[in-house]
Image: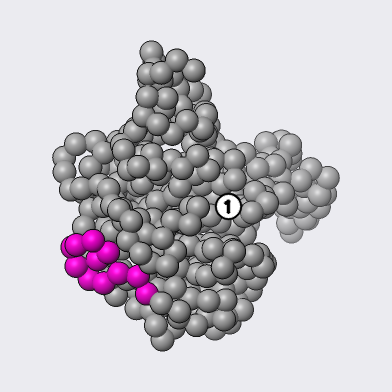
Amino acid sequence: MRRLKVGLILSCLVFAGCATHPAEFRYFTSQQEKIWPQPPLTARVKFGGVLVGEDNFVTEKSSTSIQKAWGWLTGLVFGEAAPKRLMRPHSGAVSKDGNRIYVTDIGRKAVFVFDKKKGRLDVWESATSNVGFISPIAIVENENNEILVSDADLGAVFVLTPSGEPVRVVGLNDLKRPTGLAYDAKSKLLFVADSSLHQVLVFNESGEKKYTIGKKGGGDAAFNAPTHIDLHEGRLYVVDTLNSRVQVFNQNGEYIKHFGKRGLYLGDMPRPKGITVDSAGRVFVVESYYDYLLVYNTDGEFLLPIGGSGNLPGQFFLPAGVWSDGKDNVFVADMFNGRVVQFEMLGKQDNKEQLLGMKTQ
């Protein structure tokens, strides 16, 4: 009983301390700076840090002796609660205001919301009022700040409020295994890659299917298990995963070109997954077979590899998704390392000579 009373006193002190010291969002960083390409070439990409879960939120009081005492006591008396941590992150997005980082996690069957402004981590598990997520894959934000999540096993796209409350369902009768998502705020169209239908389906703001792009096959404008997609300046980039390439269309679904191929060399795409295009037109593709993030220019010319297998800064273990924010920070869902890795771009050059530092600036 005496120990319990002490615990209650410590509890009050700890929570009082937390109230006056809000949590601060921080990336886990490396002690040594990691850049690409290596000297003597000019650095163009920098390792920014890692997201793992609620451990990314710290307070000034987090390491005081009183909290250590509280952790010891509650662990002894009540059992210590496991921290909220990523298990198998698959993809993600950053809110338009930059305050939130959304991460889908197929291991936790949930969406992680890293809210930098509020200093907290939320975990959303509900796809509808009575159905939980099973395989949340891609996530985007629409012009109404609603959050759209594709779930491959549930066969639909689920719309949530900014607080994570389920609102409606899109494509339940049209989709089979939805994966990648892209949203165009101007036309209010939602693009959904379906890896079982081997198509990209396009829906309006009412959830009505308007048209489809592609068919099953290996030729131009044909897909074999497309996964992730992205929109940039009126162009739709589709990762045609089992055809080992990226195909590019206009928003009406008219084929423009493709790049990438199956092969053993850096720049080849034996198993491409995630894709994002930054403001400079650089195309980032996750190559999951050899654990690389590959950088291309808008013409599909290979520029730079980042990664390799492992768990050190800049290495990956079966990465899945990649996305970018308004400041051209790039995020990779490093799935089997249970983390998200952030990279910072050090310039907006997008041709090969400039990116690799071979041209005088």
Indicate the amino acid at tag 1: Val
Residue 353 relative to residue 150: left or right = left
Residue 141: image location, x then y, percent: 58, 62
Element class at badge 1? strand
Q: Nearer the viewer, residue 12 or 211?
A: 211
Residue plotted at (32% across, 61% down): 255
Disc 1 crowd, CA 10 A, few/some/many (<14, 14-19, 20+): many
Task: Give the residues in magenta.
Answer: 212-223
The image quadrant of residue 237 is: bottom left
Inspect this view and state whether residue 153 appears. Answer: no
Q: Position of residue 42 (x, y in %)?
A: 43, 19
Residue 156: quadrant of the picture: bottom left
Please name the residue that numbered disc 1 is placed on. Answer: 94
**Residue 225 in magenta stretch:** no
Q: Where in the figure is residue 43, as x and y percent of width and height?
A: 45, 22
Q: Is residue 270 above or below residue 342?
A: below
* Residue at image point 59% right, 45% down: 326
> In this figure, what is the number of numbered marks?
1
Q: Is 218 within the magenta? A: yes
Please state the horizontal and vertical placement of residue 36, each as a whole percent of the image.
Answer: 40, 26
Kindly tell me whether residue 355 is visible in this rendering.
Answer: yes
Question: Which quarter of the rendering shows the N terminus?
Answer: bottom right
Query: Residue drawn 22% across and 71% down?
Result: 216
Which colour style is shown? one colour
Apparent side of residue 85 relative to residue 357 in the rendered image (left or right): right
